Amino acid sequence: MFELKALSPAAVPAALAKAERYRLLNEPEQCQSICEDVLRADPSNHAASVMLILAITDAFPTTAQGAARAMQLVAALPSEYDRSYYSGLVAERRARALLSHGGMGHRGATQWLHQAMADYERADALRPPDNDDARLRWNACARVFNAHPDLLAEDDQPNTPIMLE
């Protein structure tokens, strides 16, 4: 095993800029690695925590691993607004990942979308003045339901397991 090299505190701003570039290049694993290094150097770095949450959820279409880590980071955010908003974001992105796979994932997607909307509602009630981010995300979830009314129909069906022979 290799011992990780520590990031110097002075390098944190440049490292965060690099992490954001990797995220924009759709390389969430690289972004995650840099954010973890930043958090080792500065455990209370809010920007690194948020970017790490986003990078983890960027990878949801290929892997749901990391969801627990994302929620651990969400729980440590300093404000109730941030905790509600980013909890909604994690749930929404889990739903969208399930929808992208099709099949039986739709039932889980419905539940995650409802969870996201509830989290966004909580965040909206706590929002800072002129910050409509939670409303924008809630509307995005509502548009998924509006575009796929079959997802709402699944709410009426009992959650019984499907038995295969």
Image (cartoon, helix red, strand yellow):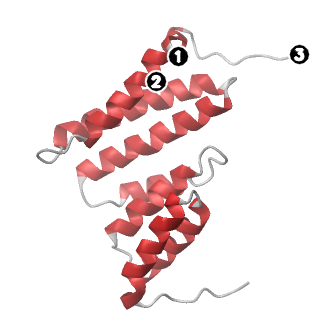
Q: Is residue 24 left or right of residue 9?
A: right
Whether 34 is drawn above or below 58: the answer is below
Residue for point 11% across, 46% down: 129
Q: Amino acid at mark 2?
A: Val
- Element type at marker 3? loop
Q: Which residue is mark 3?
A: 165
Q: Amino acid at mark 3?
A: Glu
Q: Amino acid at mark 1?
A: Leu
Q: Are marks 2 and 1 in contact (CB under 8 Å)?
A: yes
Residue 123 percent location from the top left of the image: 25, 41
Residue in the foreground of this view, choosing between 156 and 151: 151
Q: Is residue 84 left or right of residue 71?
A: left
Residue for point 54% across, 35% down: 96
Q: Which residue is mark 2?
A: 144
Q: Residues within 10 Å of mark 3 (few under 14, many from 20)?
A: few
Q: Are marks 2 and 3 in contact (CB under 8 Å)?
A: no
Residue 29 percent location from the top left of the image: 61, 63
| Circle nearer the viewer, 2 or 1 | 2
Q: Quadrant of residue 126?
A: top left
Q: How far apart are the two marked residues, 2 and 3, measured between alpha carbons?
A: 33 Å
- Element type at marker 1? helix
Residue for point 39% across, 60% down: 50
User: In the picture, which quadrant includes the C terminus?
Assistant: top right
Q: Which residue is mark 1?
A: 151
Whether 40 is drawn above or below 5: the answer is above
Residue 62 percent location from the top left of the image: 67, 47
Residue 34 percent location from the top left of the image: 52, 74
Q: How far apart are the two marked residues, 1 and 3, measured between alpha carbons?
A: 26 Å
- Give the total number of marks visible in the rendering: 3
Pick whichever of labels 2 and 1 is earlier in the sequence. 2
